Image (cartoon, coloured by chain):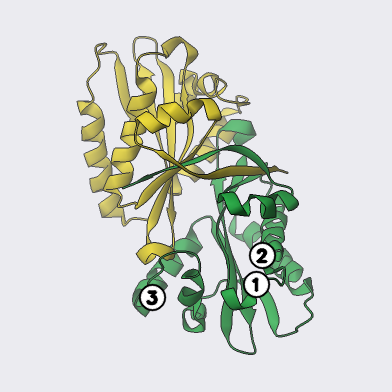
Chain colours: A yellow, B green
Amino acid sequence: MLGEKEQILLITDINAHLMNLSFEDENIIFRFLEEDDYNKNYFDLLSNLTSAPNPRFEDWREQFNKIKKSPIFIFVIEDKSKSLIVGSITCLIESKFIRNLGKVSHIEDVVVHLDYRNKKFGSKLVNIAVHFSKKLGCYKIILDARDDAMGFYQRLGFEKRSEGMALYL
Amino acid sequence: MLGEKEQILLITDINAHLMNLSFEDENIIFRFLEEDDYNKNYFDLLSNLTSAPNPRFEDWREQFNKIKKSPIFIFVIEDKSKSLIVGSITCLIESKFIRNLGKVSHIEDVVVHLDYRNKKFGSKLVNIAVHFSKKLGCYKIILDARDDAMGFYQRLGFEKRSEGMALYL
């Protein structure tokens, strides 16, 4: 999606941005998802969102590497005092032919652990995704929200534009 | 996303499926998007959907190759009697950690040329995308529909599940 050099520069910029995000609790940090997060209850966190059975480590590693090679970027929040991943957001970057060969960022799988809610972690995750998508030159960010999450996203600047439809296979 | 061998087998299967789709007019064929479609008014078709300026050929080729290497698959309808692309649908395949390391298919940029409407081309494009997504093992297909397109997708089995929200950058 990006050249290797561009990608390194971008990741450096984003990492600096993540480090600058201040928290009252210095044990709370933002960063990209890492392979070792398998051991930091990442699947326990994802289970707060939907069905997310814990895979075998080899299967995790294979999927992690596949995703890392694709235009999918996952940001997480870690509570370092407990070695736990407590928040996660995914940006899927789609290259298009329309809009001057433009790029769209799809936000997916936004989740904050039940024990860490009401701390603005969700808003910070979305802000990171917005910052990142801008840096990548995306012309828009889209996401599908449940009805009860619309207010949350509206406060962050999103507007309802379409109907989210699904076919289960 | 898939191994090279798996991908070739899948593409062979899908190509057979596409060739079997019968049309009254034998000049109308379904296939994957090809590099030469730049010369078959592909951007004129996309302009029926949204802003889609014609890029320079080198820029088209670069984007075409980038997309070909990513988990994005584009099916088109060609009218061979006129060497024109008259329909297009995009499947973006997202690998996830949730749902047993599952895959979701995102349908994007469904368009049929104004002169070729009311021939069920749209339904056939969606049916191809559904067949393909099943073959790939996706657990669901999602898309964002304008309000006036909901009925069309409902007739094809889709249900409203969420609110499509966007932030323009």
Three-letter residue code for mark 1: Arg
Q: Which circle's residue, 2 or 1, is located before the other in the chain? A: 1
Query: Residue B7, how many percent across, how many down?
Result: 63, 60
Q: Where is residue A7 in the image (x, y as percent from the top left)?
A: 30, 49
Numbered tag placed on residue B100 in the rendering: none
Judging from the image, mark 1 belongs to the subunit labelled B
Tell me which chain the residue with mark 3 is part of. Answer: B
Apparent side of residue A37 relative to residue A24 in the rendered image (left or right): right
Q: Residue B91: image x %, image y %? A: 58, 56
Is the residue under label 1 in contact with that under label 2 (CB below 8 Å)?
Answer: yes
Q: Mark 2 lies on which chain?
A: B
B50 to A27, vertically: above or below: below
Q: How crowded is mark 2: few (under 14 residues within 10 Å), some or many (20 or more)?
A: many
State the residue at coordinates (77%, 71%).
Answer: B21
Q: Which residue lies furthest to the front in this view?
A: B148
Examine the rendered structure and indicate whether residue B56 appears above or below residue B100.
below
Q: Distance between the residues labelled 3 and 2?
A: 23 Å
Determine which residue is flagged by label 3.
Answer: B54
Q: Which residue is drawn at 30% across and 52% down?
A: A137
Query: Which circle marks residue B117 in the picture?
Result: 1
Among the 4 quarters of the image, the one containing residue A56: top right
Q: Earlier in the sequence, mark 3 or mark 2?
A: 3
Real-space CA distance between mark 2 and mark 1, rounded to the nearest whole angstrom: 8 Å
**Mark 1 Cα shell of 10 Å, populated few (<14), some (14-19), many (≥20):** few
Q: Indicate the amino acid at tag 2.
A: Gly
Left or right: residue A89 versus residue A44 is left
Q: How far apart are labels 1 and 3 at the CA level?
A: 23 Å
According to the image, label 2 marks what residue? B122
Q: Are marks 2 and 1 on the same chain?
A: yes
Question: Tag 1's secondary structure?
Answer: loop
The image shows a total of numbered marks equal to 3
